[in-house]
Amino acid sequence: MTWWRRLWLRKKMEEELEKELRFHLDQHTADLIAQGLDPEEARRRARLALGGQEQVKEQCRDARGTRWLEDLPQDLRYGARMLLKKPGFTLIAILTLSLGIGANTAIFSLVNTALLRPLPVERPEQLVSINNLSLGIPVISFPNYRDFRDRMNSFSGMVAFRVTSLGLSNNGVNERVWGYLATGNYFQVLGVKPALGRFFTPDDDKSPGAHPVAVLTYDCWQKRFAGDPRAIGKTVIVNGRNFTVIGVAPQGFYGSEILYRPEIWFPMMMLAQVEASYNYLEERGNSSFYAQGRLKSGVTAPQAEAELKTIAAQLARDFPNENEGMGVTLSPAGLLGSRMRGPIIGFSAVLMAVVGLVLLLACANLADLLLARATERRKEIAVRLAIGASRWRLVRQLLTESILLSTIGGALGLLLAYWLVDAMMAFKPPISIPLSTELHIDGRVLLFTLIVSTLTGVIFGLAPTLQSTKPDLVPALKDEVSMGGYRRSWLRNGLVVSQVSLSLVLLICAGLAVRGLQRAQSLNPGLTPQNAVEMSFDLTLQGYDVSRAVEFRRRLLEHVRALPGVQYAGLSTFLPLSLIVKNYPILVEGQPEQRGANMPTVTASTATPGLISALGASLLQGRDFTEKDDESTQNFALVNETLARRFWAGQSPLGKRFSLAGPAGPWIEVIGVLQDGKYFSLSEEPTPFVYTNMRQWTGGPLTMVVRTASEPQNAIAAIRREFQQLDARLPVFDVRTLVEHMAIPLFPARVAATLLGSFGLLALLLASIGVFGMMSHAVTQRAREIGIRMALGAQAGAIFKLVVDQGLILTALGLCIGLAVAIAGTRLMSGFLYGVSALDVVTFTGVSLLLSLVALLACYIPARRATKVDPMVALRSE
């Protein structure tokens, strides 16, 4: 006989012996209790009567206790039977937990993707980004990059790269795609190996324009080349120039930034060929290159940052005109430096706090349900204790049931999380820049769900279990209901108070987000979105030179303005609130020149005649651009109110001059003042902004805005035909109305309002269920008391008030605690609100009244049921 067979037979013999001894002990104890003996005395006498058999039983129990894992299948089977006996209780508990755990899993998948998942590079913890504090964005100039690279001893390698849009022609198909210009050591420093072919190296990046090679992402290779290995060595046309494909990056690698998803890489020395006439490689004052470094082994980020600041100070002394006052710092790579890392961490923290509150609310409901369930099983628990079961054995059994509930709820919550992740991925920013918005439920997320489910079952099942396993044995065995039991149920009352307070906090967060969205939609962005349409194109894609581009632009505006229903049309290099910001240092004629980081900057764009009217912007002083301005040798500009106040306070800005290229640059004359608007985000402070007249095209995309007399969607097809007639191969992209354009700055507010609003409604539902369940159970527990009150003459109104008062007192206490927490916690949301205070009185008052009304309704039905109690039936039941 094998060892496992012997072990199985021994276990069966022990189980049979214990079962038989328990039967005799239970029977004898029950007989003695029926004779009127105290349960403890009855148990003592039963043990004496059984004599040595009881000792054998205890030995068996001890033997089994050392192998508690062997009892787990039995506990699970028993727990499953008990849960199936109460399908309503089980279903509500599982659904409640699945909502809380599912929401937490979905949001954690977002946090995992953005903050926890390592970059697909070698030793990602050593990779850091360099941030230019004076600009507020993680970019430096290329000459400064070279100096940092050559002088830094803390880095084993340092790279620079630049985001670029370009026109890719392959097999006669012209498309606008996005890519990187990167230094030759880019892939070497990151430690990435190609999936096919080779990467470009420092030898390919020595001389400007010498090596027209390109590396594709895996997705680009699959999508545009059908995964053909013969793509290596193939020539593609980029912005009208030939480039040779030399390699394919590994699957899942898109560079060293998480949010951006390019399709193609070029050596940095090909910048002039990729970006037409742009060439910033020798312009120390042009900070438009991202820089990252790899720390040497044993070097910490603070040590490297100290060295970086020392070198920055040296560069400020060597080149004061460009670098004076320049500040630098290091941050982990992957989230566009510190510019995006802070907001992303803050938004993730708010979301995790919110879903954490939802889970706490669900767990409070679970604990409340378990307490109610334990009350129903008080006689069963008392009998088991009376016949010798240890309290630890009962605690273990009840905890097994609660963990079983939480595990099933977690499994269902995981399925819900998959759906929620798909729903969140539908919230894609309405921009043409390819962003990585994919969320994945990987092993880290699954482990998080398992831990949350287990802890939920243990922590929130423990308190009800401990309370239910110490009943008053005599009343419990007689199935008596204590008249004062409800007063002693401090745990249940505390759970209700916590549910109300948590719900209030969540609802206030949701209310603030919705109010912020409403306020954002009513802000004046400096333009009129209605009855206007925009569409973008890039003549660089077709290799246009300056003369051809100017002629194309003239003919396009002429044809579009002649279309029926078109009122105004104009062109610009970029529109406000399009997430594209170009800052330039400004020198005002007659005012002292400042240098380096101390030099004031303005956001600038170019415009043709008709653009201001097409945007619906308000011209406060002066005049708009005219066609004659393009024929003049003088440059003209329209400035906003903030710029005019800053540099010409108390004076008329008309006729004043400034330069965006330093003392040697052309002077630009102010001919008009525009009303202030929003240029990067709706929450920004008033920002100096200027439009210069588009005298000549210097490359890059252009956006045309057309204002119509009627619905702008009707004019899109006709405008597209004009493009096709002028150049059938020219791709037109970002075609949308200005109302749809406003979805870009409103996107964060919409996401916050949608997510927080959904969680707030879920919290309201859970709180109402919790209050209703508590009051219903309280009425059941107090049935005898209510019967006595009614038998003594109490009126239905007094009974109704008695029940409602109990619920409203707990609700009021929960509201007070919730308000205190909300006042302290909603300050974290101030960065996501638009024109709404984090302590908005309207939101706090309205949400408090709403929750009070819901709590009153939750108390109403149990109170009405209490008034229907028949005194005779209630007294007879005792």
Image: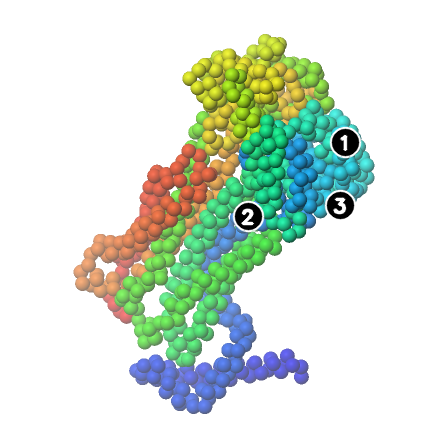
Residue at x 39% of width, y 86% of height: 46
Rendering coords of residue 662 (x, y %): 59, 21
Residue at x 35% of width, y 42% of height: 844
Q: Is residue 23 visible?
A: yes
Q: Secondary structure at mark 1?
A: loop
The circle drawn on residue 111 is 2
Between label 1 and label 2, give the one nearer the viewer. Answer: 1
Q: Please, what is the three-letter code of the amino acid marked with disc 1?
A: Ser
* Residue where numbered disc 1 is placed: 207
**Is residue 590 positioned above or below 382 on the image?**
above
Q: Please, what is the three-letter code of the amino acid marked with disc 3?
A: Ala
Q: Please, what is the three-letter code of the amino acid marked with disc 2?
A: Val
The circle drawn on residue 195 is 3
Query: Please, which colouring scheme is shown?
Result: rainbow
Q: Secondary structure at mark 3?
A: loop
- N-terminal-most mark, 1 or 2: 2
